[in-house]
Image: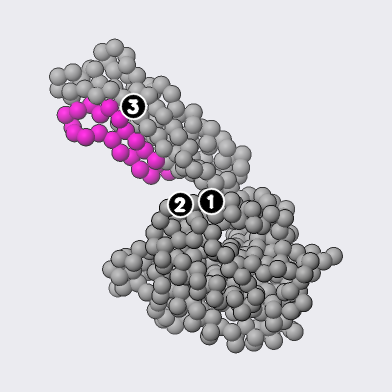
Amino acid sequence: MNAAQLRAHVEAQVPRAMEQLERMVRLNSFSGNPEGVNAVGALTAALFEPLGFEAERVGCAQPGRGDHWVLHRTGQGGPHVGLVSHLDTVFPPEEEQRHGFGWQREGDRIYGPGTVDNKGGIVVMFLVLEALRSIAPERFQWAEWTLLFNAAEEVWSPDFGQLARHRLAGASAALVFEGGQRRGEAWTVVTSRKGRALFRIRVEGRGAHAGVRPERGANALVQMAETLLRAAELTDWSRGRSVNVGVVRGGTAANRVPHEAMAEVEMRAWDPTVFEEGKAGLLALAGTGRLRARSDGYPCRVHVELLQETAPWPSNPQTERLFACWEAAGRSLGWAVEREARGGLSDANHLWDRVPTLDGLGPVGDHAHCSERSPDGSKEPEYVLASSFVPKTVLNTVALLRWLEQQES
Ligand SMILES: [Zn+2]
């Protein structure tokens, strides 16, 4: 089958696939709405069932979440390929109602919660496997397929990473269907992402009456301010590291010297060494503070706790081999395919050091995580481009076929 025939085949599947997307988008699947997440999981399982996939639900480690869904198809001795997407969105039902945010098609744009992040990715994943089964049934049956759907990607439940690493141990590729981008005439796929470390900083000082005994006070908020300035100085733009002071709390009244303060800080970096340095720098802020009570030198104490850590996904040879397949597939179709380095995390961060990983294979869209719309167009909600489904499916299908052929030799 040539590229034109493949394209025509995929085009014929798209209307039905779009109906499936509409059903998924019309179901609220906020991470905190487990029934909704599981309803999208059930629709997903039903979508892939005719391709011979068996569904399994795995409880999420976080309470109040839906289940992770794992769909599996046994192969005939061929390579094992993992495909990854997520079921949840960032939008609570009340927010969707308040902003009148739902499935709405305007020209090429389809607005709605999860259209690009990440229900559109589920639909492109389906279109790719459906096309492979039609144009290369022997290859499709030869390979073993595991599809992993995260119930809590938007709230970053690390147990999904463990599940994916376990289920894809020894796999030949992990393909992540987050949305891609269009850069001029080129399609981008994601080949690296920043890592993130999340910290809680606590300062213990000593309270005092601000009028009667101010000299007895060890002001936890002032110490926190000094500590946070030093934290922010660990930003290193030239080496791609940023530190963000996101939350600060402390004090109760202006007539008291505050005895405690709390802050949440996150650090992100592309390079593993730069990331480790940033972590060490933040942890080193702990200890006896510089701020002391005037009366007796009583010091503030600074505590730094690493709450959560996700390592960077740096450029690496395994990802490059996959990228080369996508680039060559693009060339054969007359399209440029380019690497994209992306700041946000995805499930690819959990997988790249175990399995060759590529990301951004979903459709093209914009304004993910936004639900507001203003009449002057300065605010726009999440949308996906309907016209991107066919080319992204064709590109992924041709590239994946190339990859499977390489695994044979
Ligand atoms: Zn998202």
- The residue carrying mark 1 is 159
* Residues tagged 1 and 2 counted as in contact (Cβ below 8 A): yes
The answer to whether mark 1 is within 8 Å of ligand 1 is no
- The image quarter containing residue 9 is bottom right
- The relative height of residue 332 versus residue 344 in the rendered view (above or below) is below
Name the residue: 37% across, 74% down.
102
Amino acid type for the residue under numbered disc 2: Gln
Residue 76 x/y as whole percent: 77, 69
Mark 2: which secondary structure?
A: loop
Q: Is residue 91 left or right of residue 79?
A: left
| Residue placed furthest toward the right | 409
Q: Magenta region: which residues?
A: 244-264
The residue to which callout 3 is attached is 204
Above or below residue 329? Residue 233 is: above
The secondary structure type at the circle numbered 3 is: strand
Q: Position of residue 327 (x, y in %)?
A: 70, 67
Kind of residue at disc 3: Glu
- Looking at the image, tell me whether mark 2 or mark 3 is earlier in sequence order: 2
**How busy is the neighbourhood of tag 1: few (under 14 within 10 Å), some, or many (20 plus)?**
some
- Looking at the magenta stretch, what is its main secondary structure? strand
| Placement of the N terminus among the 4 image quadrants | bottom right
Above or below, comparing residue 59 to residue 303 in the picture: below
